[in-house]
Image (spheres, helix red, strand yellow):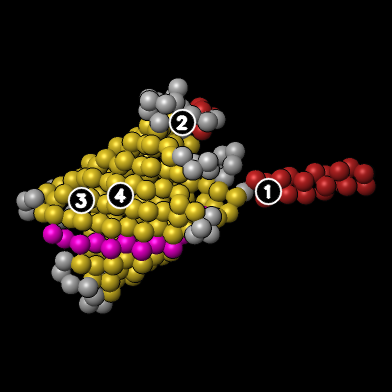
């Protein structure tokens, strides 16, 4: 009986240790420049440039350029199709080139001093289109994000957000074992500061954790985003 308990105890400890050792942790920084231009009263062009650092701010993770359209159907509903070109740095200092297509549907409502926003994103991405055997196979996700903004102050808007990601199809790596499942959650605490009517800055702290995959990673990100309207 004691032997059985000892075996169960050490088996449990071994499982915990293995599970912990497989969980990777990292800290980084995301730096974003966003340019917006109103084409009509309802349609705006949005261009984003972002640089991401990883490995405790010491190594470049990726660059991306995002080009999209915001179409405001009414004051509550917005649709935003966009394309993102990603240059992700590999360990051997070469780059993986990725193409991502996204469609966002966003709904927001103001309740006294609080703005509640819900965003659903469909995302499809291919990588190394010409240099990989699986480069033409699209990795597909649904992403669900909730934002809460507190608008009691004149120029400063604190906010929190939470996003969960659902994988529809994983054609690379471990493949279909990750299909149709939730594998990542992202929480953000931030503050937006309106410099003037055309310029604003967003400072935030992001905590992201992965689960139900072979090599989950938890990352801690400090972010700076500058937005300008032209």
According to the image, label 3 marks what residue?
A: 46
Is residue 209 left or right of 161 when viewed as pictured? right
- For the point 25% across and 49% down, which residue is it? 106
Element at label 2: loop
Distance CA(mark 1)–CA(mark 3) = 41 Å
Nearer-N-terminus badge (4/2):
4
Distance CA(mark 4)–CA(mark 2) = 22 Å
- Is residue 27 shown above or below 194? above
Distance CA(mark 2)–CA(mark 3) = 29 Å
Packing grade of label 3 (10 A; few <14, some 14-19, many >=20) is: some
Nearer-N-terminus badge (1/4):
1
On the question of residue 41 being in view, the answer is: yes
Q: Position of residue 62 (x, y in %)?
A: 41, 48
Nearer-N-terminus badge (2/3):
3
- For the point 48% across and 37% down, which residue is it? 181
According to the image, label 2 marks what residue?
A: 170
The reply to whether the magenta stretch includes residue 223 is yes
Q: Position of residue 159 (x, y in %)?
A: 35, 66
Mark identifier at residue 21: 1
Distance CA(mark 1)–CA(mark 4) = 34 Å
User: Contact, CB < 8 Å: mark 1 with mark 3?
Assistant: no
The reply to whether the magenta stretch includes residue 202 is no
Nearer-N-terminus badge (1/3):
1
Mark identifier at residue 119: 4
Q: Please identify, in this view, whether the residue under mark 1 or under mark 4 is nearer the observer.
A: 1
Element at label 1: helix
Packing grade of label 2 (10 A; few <14, some 14-19, many >=20) is: some
- Is residue 37 shown above or below 83? below
Is residue 3 left or right of 83 when viewed as pictured? right
Residue range corresponding to the magenta coloring: 219-230
């Amino acid at each position: 009986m004691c032997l059985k308990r000892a075996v169960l105890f050490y088996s449990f400890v071994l499982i915990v240790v293995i599970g912990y050792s497989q969980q990777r942790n990292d800290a980084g920084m995301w730096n974003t420049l966003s340019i917006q231009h109103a084409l009509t009263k309802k349609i705006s062009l949005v261009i984003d440039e972002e640089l991401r650092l990883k490995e405790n701010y010491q190594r470049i993770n990726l660059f991306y350029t995002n080009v999209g359209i915001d179409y405001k159907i009414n004051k509550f509903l917005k649709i935003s199709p966009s394309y993102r070109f990603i240059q992700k740095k590999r360990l051997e200092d070469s780059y993986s080139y990725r193409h991502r297509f996204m469609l966002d549907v966003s709904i927001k409502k103001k309740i006294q001093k609080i703005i509640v926003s819900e965003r659903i994103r469909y995302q499809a991405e291919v990588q190394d289109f010409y240099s990989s055997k699986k480069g033409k196979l699209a990795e597909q996700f649904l992403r669900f994000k909730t934002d809460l903004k507190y608008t009691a102050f004149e120029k400063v808007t604190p906010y929190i957000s939470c996003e969960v990601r659902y994988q529809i199809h994983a054609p690379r790596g471990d493949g279909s074992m990750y299909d149709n499942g939730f594998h990542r959650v992202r929480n953000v605490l931030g503050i937006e500061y309106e410099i003037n009517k055309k310029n604003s800055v967003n400072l935030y702290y992001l905590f992201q954790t992965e689960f139900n995959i072979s090599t989950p990673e938890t990352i801690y990100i400090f972010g700076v985003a500058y937005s300008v309207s032209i």
